């Protein structure tokens, strides 16, 4: 059953994000507008015009920030833009001179923001300033990170890409905790279980693997 149909875009809607508390929905259309909706009432809460292409959008926890980029599956963008959700003002743009952005995510508590451009380095940022707080070399072989994700408790970071491995990192120390090997082709996507005990990787080799996060062993 369709509960509501939301209208307000003049161009195709290319990105969606639901806030972690489930109260807000963000929709964005390329070079058109970003609209934030109250999910319970289906009413527009705020909106602002944009001039860039958008295929990926995300709302941080506490509904403080919004990140927008043209990065999508098998599609890179030159960077991203960060917005203050309360004022709808752009805070800054993150750009990569020689490498395109493949993935971006807020930590569950909203204190950090990760970017993985198409090189070996995944960076941890302050979302308000964009300052790089730390970084990890996530693919020493091919130098290409396809995906990255925080654990739900915000303690760990998982990265994967062209080296066919899944890398689990301790965010507090920057140390690699475990590494899954076994895929025979590139790793395209990954996800943590809600309790953080397992993660799943999926590859061009037509397999998905369930992994014990503590040991790095496939189940």
Image (cartoon, rainbow, N blue to C red):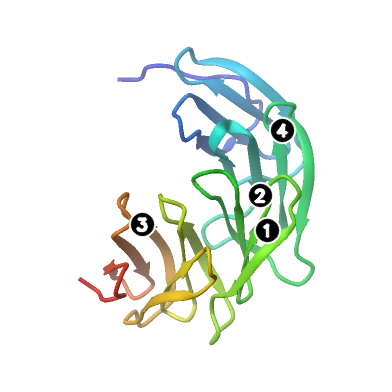
Given residues 189 and 204, the one toward you in this image is 189
**SS type, badge 4:** loop
Task: Measure the C-alpha gap from mark 2 to mark 4.
Answer: 14 Å
Given residues 69 and 167, the one toward you in this image is 167
**Residues at discs 4 and 3 in contact (Cβ within 8 Å):** no
- Are there few (<14), some (14-19), or many (20+) residues within 10 Å of tag 4? some
Q: Which residue occupies 47% across, 20% down?
A: 39
Residue on which the image places disc 4: 32
Residue on which the image places disc 3: 192
Residue on which the image places disc 2: 69
Residue 55 left/right relative to 2: right
Task: Measure the C-alpha gap from mark 1 to mark 4.
Answer: 18 Å
Q: Position of residue 192 (x, y in %)?
A: 36, 57
Q: Earlier in the sequence, mark 1 or mark 3?
A: 1
Residue on which the image places disc 1: 77
- Are there few (<14), some (14-19), or many (20+) residues within 10 Å of tag 1? many
Q: Earlier in the sequence, mark 2 or mark 3?
A: 2
Task: Measure the C-alpha gap from mark 4 to mark 3.
Answer: 33 Å
- Marks 4 and 3: which is nearer the front? 3
Q: Which residue occupies 46% across, 76% down?
A: 176
Q: Earlier in the sequence, mark 2 or mark 4?
A: 4
Q: Quadrant of the N terminus?
A: top left
- Are there few (<14), some (14-19), or many (20+) residues within 10 Å of tag 2? many
Q: Position of residue 55 (x, y in %)?
A: 60, 47
Q: Position of residue 19 (x, y in %)?
A: 50, 33
Q: Which residue occupies 31% across, 75% down?
A: 216
**SS type, badge 1:** loop
């Amino acid at each position: 059953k369709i509960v509501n149909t939301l209208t307000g875009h003049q161009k195709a809607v290319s990105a969606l994000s639901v806030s972690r508390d489930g109260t807000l929905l963000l929709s964005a259309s390329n070079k058109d507008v970003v609209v934030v909706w109250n999910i319970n009432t289906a009413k527009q809460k705020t909106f602002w015009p944009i001039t860039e292409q958008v295929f990926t959008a995300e709302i941080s926890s506490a509904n403080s920030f919004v990140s927008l980029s043209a990065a999508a599956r098998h599609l890179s963008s030159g960077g991203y833009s960060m917005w203050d959700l309360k004022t709808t003002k752009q805070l800054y743009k993150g750009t990569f001179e020689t490498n395109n952005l493949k993935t971006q995510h807020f930590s569950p508590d909203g204190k950090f923001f990760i970017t993985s451009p198409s090189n070996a380095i995944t960076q941890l940022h302050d979302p308000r300033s964009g300052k790089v707080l730390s970084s990890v070399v996530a693919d020493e072989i091919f130098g290409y990170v396809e995906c990255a994700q925080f654990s739900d408790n915000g303690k760990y970071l998982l990265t994967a890409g062209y080296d066919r491995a899944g890398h689990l990192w301790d965010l507090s120390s920057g140390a690699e905790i475990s590494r899954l090997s076994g895929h025979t082709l590139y790793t395209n996507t990954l996800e943590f279980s809600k309790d953080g005990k397992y993660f799943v990787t999926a590859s061009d080799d037509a397999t998905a693997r369930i992994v014990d996060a503590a040991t790095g062993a496939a189940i």
